[in-house]
Image: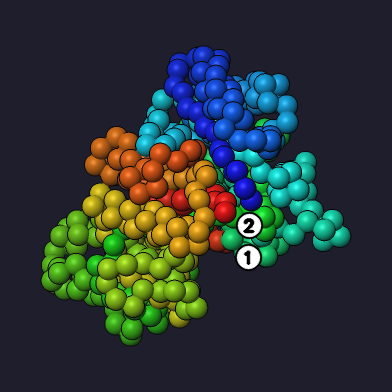
Amino acid sequence: MHDLTFVHADAAHVEWQVALADCQRQLDTQDLLRQARLDHAPPLTLGWCYLSDYYALAAEAILAALQQNWPGVSWVGTVGLGVLASGVEYFDQPAMVLLAAPLPRQAFQLFSGRQPLPAASSGFVPHTALVHAEGSTPDVQELLHELSVRTATGYLFGGLSSARNRTLHIADGVYSGGLSGVLFGPEVELVSRVTQGCQPIGPARAVTRSEHNLLFALDGKPALDCVLQDLGVERDAPVEAMAAALSGTLAGLNAATDDAPVQPGRFGADTLVRHLIGLDVQHRVLALADQVAPGMRLAFCMRNAAAARADLERIATEIRTDIEHGGGHARGALYISCSGRGGPHFGAPHAELQTVRAALGDLPLAGFFAGGEIARDHLYGYTGVLTVFTSH
């Protein structure tokens, strides 16, 4: 695709009408500049609208205003505890972020409860998909897997809405429950990565005995002994000392066929990071916040600001390198981060988004703080999913 210039806007105000008017002025100005720069500039066709939960109750009115002002644009989005723009995060404050792109109309299709996935006979072959969903949706993980199978690459990216008042998602309508989003054809070029934001503290081990969420043995050794060894805590330390050490420790899980880490220092993209939620000193057992099965690979890890910044910088740099080596140009980006990864986790307000901007430049970007992050056919937690749209 050529001349794929995105436009974007962000604003914060206690009244959503004021913020929306500010965003629309920004978009109108950028669109005029885009048309002045390009001969026969293609029209904007797809827009993203991310709202902080302060605006959740006004979602229908906001969507109606966008559709009136931009009648040729299909709008998708959701609500979060915060929203993201280039170099800026609006966490726990009334704000919105808009992004719009001139994608060929035949290159994407929206889907929702009112717009089913296209039939095979339609001729449209989805290669990737942006997904917005709600965590309360029954069997959401299974639905993601089914949607992934319906795409040529199997790659999904997106996140779960997060709000204190009303969770919702947008796809030319406002929905609660289920999934919605955009299917992209092969013409839409993009590069996407997951940042785990944490660092393994020990080797990957095979799960040799487990039941439901209880972890009994790793590499044939008691699970509790393994994590204490990685943490440098004595096997017979007081229970209080064990609990204190384990309070900041997590488990990175991989299926046996995934790209599990083989040494300390880095996780593969398929790793699911889960909390440790209990221990049994007598039987040397750990309890995890997820199901764990024999044959899986597991590495204990820690999450901190330095590890989070380093991993985010790494994936953003990988994306930039991939684009440059492919002879392409970055045109716009989506970044979906866990609501538990706000400013304090990165050491300062806006630090997370400034890390992205330092690697990618001042690229038009929109996103939100999610209740769960989607990449491939997995549902993650405490991660970030960075997706960059490109053109040649």
Question: Callout 1, which amino acid?
Answer: Thr
Residue 2 point in image, percent of width and height: 62, 48
Q: Is residue 77 above or below residue 130?
A: above
Cα–Cα gap, marks 2 and 1: 6 Å
Q: Nearer the viewer, residue 179 or 226?
A: 179
Left or right for 249, reference 368: left
Q: Residue at coordinates 42% horizontally, 51% vertically from top-left? A: 384
Q: Nearer the viewer, residue 32 or 128?
A: 32
Residue 140 sits in quarter: bottom right
The residue depicted at 37 percent of the width and 46 percent of the height is 356
| Residue 325 sits above or below residue 29 on the image | below
Residue 334 at x, y = what percent?
50, 44
Residue 92 placement: quadrant: top left
Answer yes or no: do the residues labelled 2 and 1 have beta carbons within 8 Å? yes
Q: Which percent across, then down, holds residue 94? A: 45, 23
Q: Going 52% across and 45% down the picture, which residue do you hit?
A: 331
Camera-side residue of 9 and 294: 9
Residue at 71% from the left image edge and 45% from the top image edge: 104
Neighbour tally class for label 2: few under 14, some 14-19, many 20 plus, Cα within 10 Å: many
Name the residue that disc number 2 marks: 128
Callout 1 secondary element: loop
Circle 1 crowding by C-alpha within 10 Å: few under 14, some 14–19, many from 20: some
Relative horizontal placement of residue 251, taking residue 94 as reference (left or right):
left
How far across and down, in percent of the image, does residue 9 sit?
50, 28
The residue under label 1 is 153
Outermost residue on the right side: it is: 121
Q: Secondary structure at mark 2?
A: strand
Disc number for residue 214: none
Instruction: Return the residue nearer the eye: 350 or 123.
Output: 123
Is residue 286 among what the camera can see? no
Residue 32 vs residue 387: left or right? right
